[in-house]
Image (tube, helix red, strand yellow):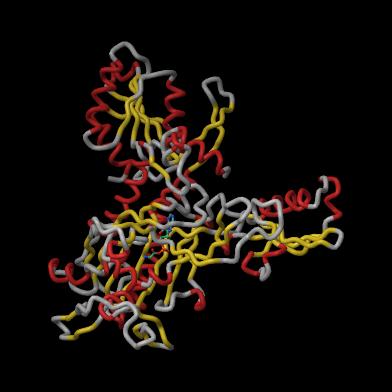
Amino acid sequence: MDMDKLVSLCKRRGFLFQSSEIYGGLNGFWDYGPLGTELKRNIKEAWWRDMITGHDDLDAPAGAPSAFQMVGLDSTIIMHPQIWKCSGHYDLFHDFMVDCRESKKRYRHDQVRGRWVSYQGKRAFVATQFGGDEGLAETEQKGLKFFGLRAKDAERLAWEGDLISLTKVADFAEVLGPDAKALGTLTPPREFNLMFKTYVGALSGEEGAAFLRPETAQGIFVNFKNVVDSSRVSVPFGIAQVGKSFRNEITPRNFTFRSREFEQMEIEFFCHPSQSADWYKYWRDRRYRWYTELGLAGDRLILRDHHQDELSHYSCGTADIEYAFPFLPPGEFGELEGIAHRGDFDLRSHMEGKLVREGDTLVVVKDAEGKPRHRGSGKDLSYYDDITRERFIPHVIEPSAGADRATLAFLCEAYTEDKVPDENGNPRERVFLKLHPRLAPVKAAVFPLVKKDGMPEVAQKIYRDLKKHFNVYYDEKGAVGRRYARQDEIGTPYCITVDGETLTSGTVTIRDRDTLKQWRVKVDDCVAELSKGLGG
Ligand code: GAP
């Protein structure tokens, strides 16, 4: 699939716009237009319904060790700064960046790649931000330019091997930065904390410093006790939250994939330590299934277990759900969601202070004087089980998804081009979004075939009746073929047309977006017919 075509459709039809566009845009920030807003809302609502309100807590779902409860939470974006010290974000949530003294651009150290090339005894590492064929093509072009050669002299350059990461280059003196003309313009890598800093109230100094949350998860951990004490939940249970998170990404890119402001859909599932391995497996499989049920399938969606050496210091297991986004080189996948077994790391950190793993145990990080480096709340966040009469600190399984990445993946997967016969039987290009009906921004469009003979009045009545149940659209402008094409392009599953026969037989045609099949139903049966097709 050609990503440029999807990006252009998203702008043209009002799914996504660059933030602050009339002022030249702001890199890493995106606005959702009318249709994008509906699509993302539908994704978040499907998640909320499937994970929380629609969850049956009386029976164990297939694959689950037991029945369990799910509740929601909506915590603040700015929280007590100590939270980020105990969670580890204050000390550890950073990327390494390199700056270019010539272009003034900043790059993530691990995202710059390049190739060694020599010519007449001079050697250079030609850097690029692209991978795969695109990266190879760019380095070839840049290599020629750097050595003042023309395309026909390409074979005079001696390239060494494939693209490698800049992290494998020790001395930057021979590096030609991705946007530089001279060698050695990149600075050594430096740590860069990804949290956005702000100041609360009238205190402008460090006393008033706070952070925009880089994840919604911590709001759940610090409310664990409040929820247990107020909601009659008992372990095992999960707390879910959907909300904005902020990360000052060094190189936001790939449309909305890596943004600086984005939305997360996170669950923290609290369970008994002896059962946490089973719950981890349950959530890992269940979350993967959720994406497949909504249309991400085939070999473009994978569930990848992290290797032991990839795991965070507190984690006993992590798996990523990844999608082969079309902007990635062939064979590469981008993360949609991580499912992590976090042990008791988070609750204990907020009780005792910032923890690290030492061997098989977690210990509080101490400063030179032996005092906790970042003190916890001191509150007891353990759980008492009335039935077993046991007190313990629950283990946590965390399925953490990105709403914007899910939206982008569903859009990429849905984008379809095919050829259909036009009115004269000639093949016509058709672009349509094959979105799952639950996700489609508009569920049905209602058209009068022509703007006369009482057809608009009947169509408007049908539109108003349907509007009470679904997000539907009324359109009477232009040729009906054009109206179908416009709905196909935004993924509307059904089009209902009022024609001459409607006035005599009281029936309308319903057209299916994917099969293009048309059939007649009674006007009074439209709501029931659509409910059947939309699955609700
Ligand atoms: N609480 C765990 C956590 O935040 P994460 O892997 O850093 O884990 C979870 O983030 C999900 O949030 C990712 O799988 C991704 O879908 C989304 N996400 C993370 N950073 C993002 C960014 N810069 N832009 C868009 N989505 C992002």
- Residue 354 is drawn in which quadrant? bottom left
Q: Position of residue 454 (x, y in %)?
A: 28, 13
- Whether 451 is drawn above or below 247: the answer is above
- Residue at position x 27%, y 45% in the image: 536
- Which residue: 67% across, 68% down? 169
Estimate the x, y position of residue 100 in percent, counting from the top left.
61, 56
Total numbered labels placed on residues in the image: 0
**Up-down relation of residue 434 to residue 72 (above or below):** above
Quadrant of the displayed image that contains ligand 1: bottom left
Foreground: 408 or 370? 370
Q: Which of the 4 image quarters holds residue 392? A: bottom left
User: Considering the image in quadrants, where does the N terminus appear?
Assistant: top right
Q: Residue 76 in the image: state x and y as whole percent.
A: 25, 58
Is 210 in front, or is 255? 210
Q: Name the side, left or right, on which 443 lies relative to 161.
A: left
Residue 161, quarter of picture: bottom right
- Please give the name of the residue rendered at 26% of the width and 59% of the height, measured from the top-left corner: 203
